[in-house]
Image: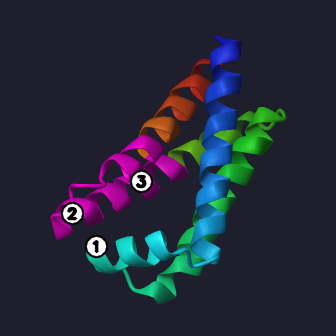
């Protein structure tokens, strides 16, 4: 069980860190997706900060601060529920697998952090 926790948590941290970099760099795919779901570009830094906090919290949980890791995982789950909701509201389904994948990683990190 510990090995699964390590692998999933590290993948979740790396995925979210990569997403933060793309958001802050205002990558073309980020801007296009944001426009499609009706997200103002001005929100990108705040959303990137939330994802960065989630990744940092998972790292702290991994390093022994278990409750912070659990809280960070809960935060990421809620963040990606919001992202999925934005896609559904805007009827943008062709790329919903991306926030769905991040959501799945966050849920798996949460479950494994609690079980570990």
Main secondary structure of the magenta stretch: helix
Which mark, residue 92? 2
* Residue at (67, 61) in percent of width and height: 52
Instruction: Give SS at disc 1.
Output: helix
- Marks 1 and 2 in Cβ contact (< 8 Å): yes
Residue corresponding to mark 3? 80
| Count of numbered labels shown in the rendering | 3
Frontmost of labels 2 and 3 is 2
Which one is nearer the viewer's eye here, 28 or 1?
28
Residue occupying the point 47% across, 71% down = 30
CA–CA distance in space, label 3 to label 1: 14 Å
Q: Which mark is residue 37?
A: 1
Discs 3/1, front = 1
Q: Dot 3, crowdedness within 10 Å: few (<14), some or many (≥20)?
A: many
In the displayed structure, does residue 22 sit left or right of residue 59? left
Sequence-wise first label, 3 or 1: 1
Note whether 34 is above or below 70 in the view shown: below
Residue 71 appears in the rendering:
no
Relative vertical location of residue 48 with respect to residue 10 in this rendering, above or below? below
Residues at discs 2 and 3 in contact (Cβ within 8 Å): no
């Amino acid at each position: 069980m510990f090995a699964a926790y390590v692998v999933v948590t590290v993948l979740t941290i790396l995925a979210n860190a990569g997403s933060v970099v793309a958001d802050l760099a205002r990558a073309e795919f980020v801007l296009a997706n944001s426009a499609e779901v009706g997200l103002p570009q001005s929100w990108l830094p705040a959303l990137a900060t939330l994802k960065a906090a989630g990744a940092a919290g998972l790292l702290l949980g991994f390093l022994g601060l278990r409750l912070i890791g659990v809280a960070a995982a809960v935060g990421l789950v809620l963040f990606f529920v919001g992202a999925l909701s934005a896609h559904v509201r805007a009827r943008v389904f062709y790329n919903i697998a991306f926030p769905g994948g991040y959501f799945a990683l966050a849920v798996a990190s949460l479950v494994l952090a609690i079980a570990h």
